[in-house]
């Protein structure tokens, strides 16, 4: 894990989205994905989790070292999130394990919005166009409505130089949230939207 992280209370994030949110077709999709993945990780790990953001050191110093970040502080802080970072957010255990939080770093992308072609070849080309250094970060891609993917073909397209530790997808359809991992292990979970977006 990196050092310059701040963990935000889930209720503060939800209140921020209600008050200042501009919807899932904006940069807010990262916050929405963070909430969904927090709930997903809690179900998978059977532990309470928190959402963290990587901040520049001078931004981090402006926040309280104890207690929770207020709504106004969150609004101002999100303007200063390190956009050059490989990490968009972190999902970590609420309680410390061996003196520190255990968790997963996520790079969030979305695919399909504004595209005429939303097929397997297009998403393979999109993934291969991402240029990052090798890391232990998980790439999670939110799929827009109408995306048609041959999952095995997509998985077979991933080569040994894939820079991310894992590749996951999130898609919502018919009031269900589908969360799938195709690399390194293929698997899909589905949840009632009300259970995972809360």
Image: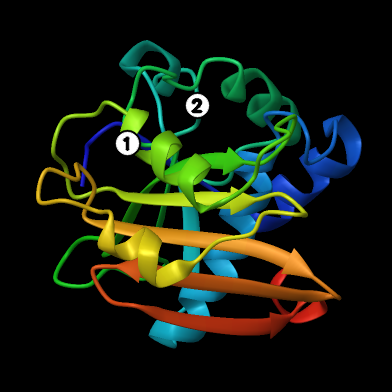
> Which element is circle 1 on?
helix
Res. 157 image quadrant: bottom left
Q: Is residue 38 left or right of residue 101?
A: right
| Residue 92 in sight in this render | no
Residue 122 x, y percent position in the rendering = 51, 40
Depicted 83 relative to depicted 137: above or below: above
| Residue 46 in sight in this render | yes
Mark 1–mark 2 distance (CA, rounded to whole Å): 38 Å
Closer to the chain start, of discs 1 and 2, is: 2
User: Label 1: which residue?
Assistant: 128
> Which element is circle 2 on?
loop
The quarter of the picture where the C terminus appears is bottom right
Depicted 166 relative to depicted 110: above or below: below
| Residue closest to the far left | 160
Q: Is residue 12 left or right of residue 190?
A: right
Q: Is residue 101 left or right of residue 98?
A: right
Q: Nearer the viewer, residue 155 or 76?
A: 155
- Residue at 27% across, 63% down: 156
Residue 126 x, y percent position in the rendering = 44, 35
| Residue closest to the far right | 19
Residue 180 x, y percent position in the rendering = 48, 72
User: Label 2: which residue?
Assistant: 63
- Residue at 70% across, 46% down: 13
Q: Nearer the viewer, mark 1 or mark 2?
A: 1
- Residue at 27% across, 76% down: 185
Q: Residues within 10 Å of mark 1 (few under 14, many from 20)?
A: some
Residue 165 x, y percent position in the rendering = 21, 55
Depicted 197 relative to depicted 160: above or below: below
């Amino acid at each position: 894990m990196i050092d310059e992280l701040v963990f935000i209370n889930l209720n503060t994030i939800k209140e921020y989205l209600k008050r200042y949110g501009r919807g899932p077709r904006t940069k807010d999709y990262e916050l929405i994905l963070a909430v969904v993945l927090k709930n997903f990780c809690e179900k998978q790990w059977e532990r309470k989790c928190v959402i963290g953001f990587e901040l520049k050191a001078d931004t981090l110093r402006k926040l309280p070292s104890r207690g929770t970040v207020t709504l106004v502080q969150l609004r101002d802080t999100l303007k200063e999130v390190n956009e050059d970072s490989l990490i968009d957010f972190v999902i970590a255990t609420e309680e410390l394990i061996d003196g520190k939080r255990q968790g997963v770093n996520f790079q969030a992308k979305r695919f399909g919005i504004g595209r005429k072609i939303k097929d397997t070849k297009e998403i393979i080309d999109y993934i291969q166009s991402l240029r990052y250094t090798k890391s232990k970060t998980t790439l999670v891609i939110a799929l827009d409505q109408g995306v048609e993917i041959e999952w095995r073909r997509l998985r077979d397209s991933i080569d040994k130089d894939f820079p991310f530790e894992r590749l996951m997808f999130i898609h919502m359809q018919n009031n269900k949230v589908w969360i799938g991992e195709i690399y390194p292990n293929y698997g899909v979970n589905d949840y009632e939207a009300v259970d995972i977006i809360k």
